[in-house]
Image (spheres, rainbow, N blue to C red):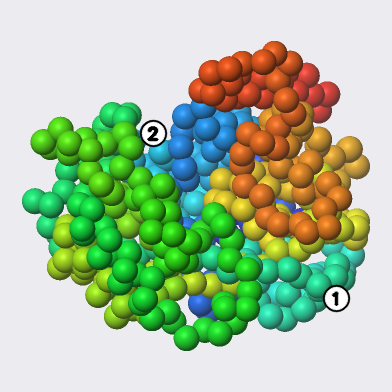
Amino acid sequence: MEKRINVIGAGLAGCEAALQISARGVPVRLFDIKPKSFTPAHSNPDFCELVCSNSLKSDLLSTAGGMLKAELRLMKSRVLEAADSSSVPAGSALAVDRAVFAKKVDSAVKADPLIEIVCEEIKRIPEGEVTIVATGPLTTDALAADISSKFGQNLHFYDAEAPIISGDSIDYSETFTADRYGKGESDYVNCPLTKEEYERFIKELVSAECAERKEFEKSDVFEGCMPVEIMAKRGEDTLRFGPLRPVGFRDSAGNRPYAVVQLRRENAAGSAYNIVGFQTNLKFGEQKRVFSLIPALKSADYLRYGVMHRNSFVNAPKTINKGFMTKLSGVFIAGQLSGVEGYVESVASGLIAGVNAVRYVKDIPLLELPPTTITGALCDYLVRENADFQPMNANFGILPPLNAKIRDKNAKKLAYSERGLKDLKEYINTGTEDLWK
């Protein structure tokens, strides 16, 4: 039997890594504190719980997120397969029923005969064993201290989660259903605001009381999860050019609203909705008071209020290589702890780390995906010297330039995707070893 590989953390990256390793015939020991214990951000006893949102972003190949998911499908990602089969209507985006998604991954992991589940807090990286650390942004204090002692001081920023409201508490007479520019199947519930309603909302939002967590005031907030109240303080129209932008919409009377708050389904039944882009650190009572100024949400029942939490990551250029292996041979770091930002990006890092852990055990050179792929470009970004390293998500800006100049923006983005997917297919098909399962 092949040498066993440890995976610490059963989130997106950890579960993907474990399933990729077992698919290659290598036994896995998967450690997680669930279900005996939970981090402050988790509540579902199943593995692979999504916390901040149920959206895995756009599926369009004219977007970097869509390109990344297409790459993962080519590489046979097990977690993305579960997401595809757990999807709920969300226009051109891939959004999932969180509970169904977590249950599918949890069941796949627990049914795998080569994966041994150990419910235990790991406080130190095991010495002399091939190990993938994928404990995420809320790595427990003891393990975080061990990581810091081995690889240097961890960096961190703070991100936030949006509230979830009950579907039957929405005043649908104040909404219209549509997707921006008519794309999709009208899966979003849109809550329009007049100029007066918007200005009153902004006035109350910027003066609302935040949760009393002084450490947030002294720390960086990640731009990709910027609390809505912080965005609003940057200028009265900031939200109208951000999550509340009205472009691409017409209400039932054919008029473009002054601003639009979008609601996205949390589950297939439509009994719960996420307030899109409303990550927040307001006190719970303030969330209810201020968000009720949105006419459609004046009587909304909150199934979960928005919260803010710490997100830790290592200084990737000084810690890992392109294959997510650290300077300690046989020790890998994957997921958001490695410096990738986003759900799908975490899955990609887990897939690469899992495949590379097997290659390390088999004494085969680690994968280096083409830099024209989003996955390969993310790997390149993580190891590039950077005096002010910050986590990175999928975007076309990290890809090498196209050979030909294309003026049309949409056509240019599609060209990036077509080039990268072509290169990835060639890379997979010309491999000399049977490691793509």
* Residue at position x 33%, y 37% in the image: 247
Task: List x then y, in percent, for residue 405.
Answer: 67, 15
Label 1 environment density (alpha carbons within 10 Å; few <14, some 14–19, many ≥20): few
Q: CA distance from mark 1 to mark 2?
A: 44 Å
Q: In the displayed structure, does residue 414 sit left or right of residue 24?
A: left
Residue 335 in view of the camera: no
Rendered location of residue 172, percent (x, y): 12, 52
Residue 137 quadrant: bottom right
* Amino acid type, residue under disc 1 in the picture: Ser
Query: Circle 2 — which element?
Result: loop
The foreground one among 199 and 342 is: 199
Name which of mark 1 and mark 2 comes first in the sequence.
2
Q: Residue at x 21, y 59 (%)?
A: 197
Q: Position of residue 353 (x, y in %)?
A: 74, 48
Between residue 249 and residue 234, name the one nearer to us: 234
**Residue found 50% across the figure and 39% down from its top:** 81
Q: Crowding at label 2, few (<14), some or many (≥20) Cα neighbours within 10 Å?
A: some
> Which residue in the protein does label 1 denote?
149
Looking at the image, residue 177 sits to the left or right of residue 107; the answer is left
Residue 353 vs residue 90: left or right?
right
Q: Is residue 39 above or below residue 390?
A: below
Numbered disc total? 2
The answer to whether residue 180 is left or right of residue 324 is left
Type of amino acid at the residue the image marks with label 2: Ser
The residue identified by callout 2 is 92
Q: Position of residue 233 (x, y in %)?
A: 45, 66
Name the image quarter holding the C terminus.
top right
Q: Which element carries disc 1, helix, strand or loop?
A: helix
Residues at marks 1 and 2 touching, judged by CB atoms closer than 8 Å: no
Q: Can residue 249 be seen here?
A: yes
Return the residue nearer the eye: 62 or 99.
62
